[in-house]
Image (tube, rainbow, N blue to C red):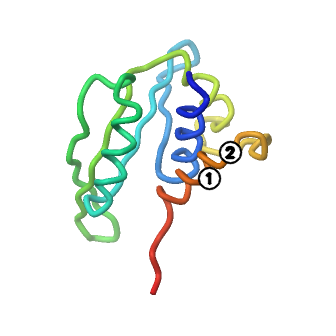
């Protein structure tokens, strides 16, 4: 995987992205979801990672604290290149901050972390 795409995924994993692995021998897929108001960032991310995906982003419904929300989500196919990230970011199927985060946190990763989790405050 090219280093700039790797950094983008690292940044998104630090925010609202996640990885899925069916079992120890399976390959991993990357998923990312944001509320519809943030659809511009989802589409931007999708366009960068589209060659790993088999379909366009989809509108998904969610519920949190008795409030219905709608978001945009995309998923990649399952690839071996995502297995390393799964090993770094997951312990016993729980998402963790990797011990080598300092090495992973490039300017591109930091920018994507902020875009995925950042909020405008006035």
Above or below, 56 against 24 in this view is below
Badge 2, how many Cα within 10 Å: few under 14, some, many 20+?
some
Rendered-image quadrant of the C terminus: bottom left
Q: Secondary structure at mark 2?
A: loop
Q: Residue at x 66, y 28 (%)?
A: 87
Quarter of the figure with residue 37: bottom left
The image position of residue 30, as x and y in percent, is: 45, 33
Q: Secondary structure at mark 1?
A: helix
Mark 1–mark 2 contact, CB under 8 Å?
yes
The image position of residue 119, as x and y in percent, is: 46, 71
38 left or right of 7 in image: left
How many numbered marks does the figure carry? 2
Q: Residue furthest top?
A: 25
Above or below, 105 against 90 in this view is below
Q: CA distance from mark 1 to mark 2?
A: 6 Å
93 left or right of 104 in image: left
Above or below, 86 against 99 in this view is above
15 left or right of 36 in image: right
Q: Residue furthest bottom?
A: 122
Q: Nearer the viewer, residue 3 or 81?
A: 3
Badge 1, how many Cα within 10 Å: few under 14, some, many 20+?
some
Which residue in the protein does label 1 denote?
Answer: 110
The image position of residue 15, as x and y in percent, is: 52, 53
Give the number of the disc on residue 60.
Answer: none
Which residue in the protein does label 2 denote?
Answer: 106
Quarter of the figure with residue 86: top right
């Amino acid at each position: 995987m090219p280093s700039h795409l790797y950094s983008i995924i690292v940044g998104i994993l630090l925010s609202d992205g996640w990885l899925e692995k069916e079992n120890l021998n399976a390959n991993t897929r990357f998923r990312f979801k944001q509320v519809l108001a943030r659809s511009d960032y989802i589409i931007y991310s999708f366009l960068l990672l589209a060659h790993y995906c088999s379909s366009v982003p989809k509108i998904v419904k969610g519920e949190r604290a008795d409030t219905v929300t709608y978001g945009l989500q995309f998923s990649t196919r399952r690839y071996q290149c995502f297995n390393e990230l799964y090993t770094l970011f997951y312990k016993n199927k729980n998402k963790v901050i990797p011990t080598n985060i300092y090495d992973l946190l490039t300017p591109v990763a930091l920018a994507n972390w902020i875009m995925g989790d950042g909020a405008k405050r006035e």
